[in-house]
Amino acid sequence: MAARTAKKAAKRPALKKSMAKKGSAKKAPAKKAAKAKAPARKAPAKAPAKAPARKAAAAVEKPEKSRAAMKPKNPNGSYTQGEFLENIRAFCGLTRRSEAKELVEDINSLITETLRKGYKIPFFGLGKMYVRNTKERMGRNPATKEEILIPAKKRVRFAPSKALKDSVLG
């Protein structure tokens, strides 16, 4: 039995040495891989040198303004939000759709705030938009035929210009 124990003891250190070699072999490539990744992380820091080339390319590739509206894909003839933004982008000669979305959001907030304050907004060549106050009035419930009082409220109105009517209606 002593012989068996001696053999096992002799094998154990050998196993530990081989494991140690394997462990150190695994650690060395891991360190090399970490060192290899470090320059890759530093590479984006050199991006400012490439930035002028991008600016020059952006200046060269300025999109042309499209003065024709694209046909909506909906069968009822209404634009989706994406189609409308794409039309704005092409019509204004913007490079990105996000710029068109920002422009539309800014115009919407301007119109909303202006109407909330009670001002009239002229759209040159199209008409004007304004808020109109309605008076309270008597109405009738069609189901019960009972007379009811309809309260006064504000409504947003658009008055088209003569030029718009002539161009659209013929």
Image (cartoon, rainbow, N blue to C red):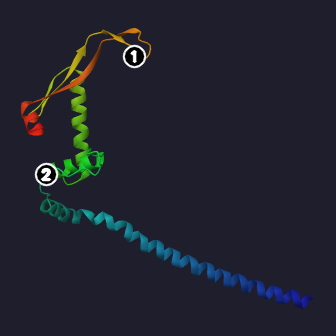
| In the foreground, 133 or 9 | 133
Label 2 sits on a secondary structure element that is loop
Amino acid type, callout 1? Pro
Q: Is residue 110 left or right of residue 140?
A: left
Mark carried by residue 85: none
Label 1 sits on a secondary structure element that is loop
Q: Residue at x 71, y 81 (%)?
A: 16
| In the foreground, 82 or 53 | 82
Q: Is residue 15 left or right of residue 159?
A: right
The answer to whether 151 is drawn above or below residue 122 in the figure is: above
**Whether residue 125 can be seen here:** no
Q: How would you rate the neighbour count of disc 1 (Cα within 10 Å): few for under 14, some for 14-19, many for 20 or more? A: few
Image quadrant for the C terminus?
top left
Q: Residue at x 38, y 70 (%)?
A: 40
Q: How would you rate the neighbour count of disc 2 (Cα within 10 Å): few for under 14, some for 14-19, many for 20 or more? A: few
Q: Badge 2 is on which residue?
A: 68
Marks 1/2 in contact by CB < 8 Å: the verdict is no
If you read the primary sequence from the N terminus, does the residue marked by circle 1 or circle 2 appear first? 2
Mark 1–mark 2 distance (CA, rounded to whole Å): 47 Å
Amino acid type, callout 2? Ala
Please tell me how many numbered marks the rendered image carries.
Answer: 2
Q: Badge 1 is on which residue?
A: 142
Q: Residue at x 93, y 88 (%)?
A: 1
| Residue 147 position within the rendered picture, expressed as x and y whole percent measured from the top left | 38, 8
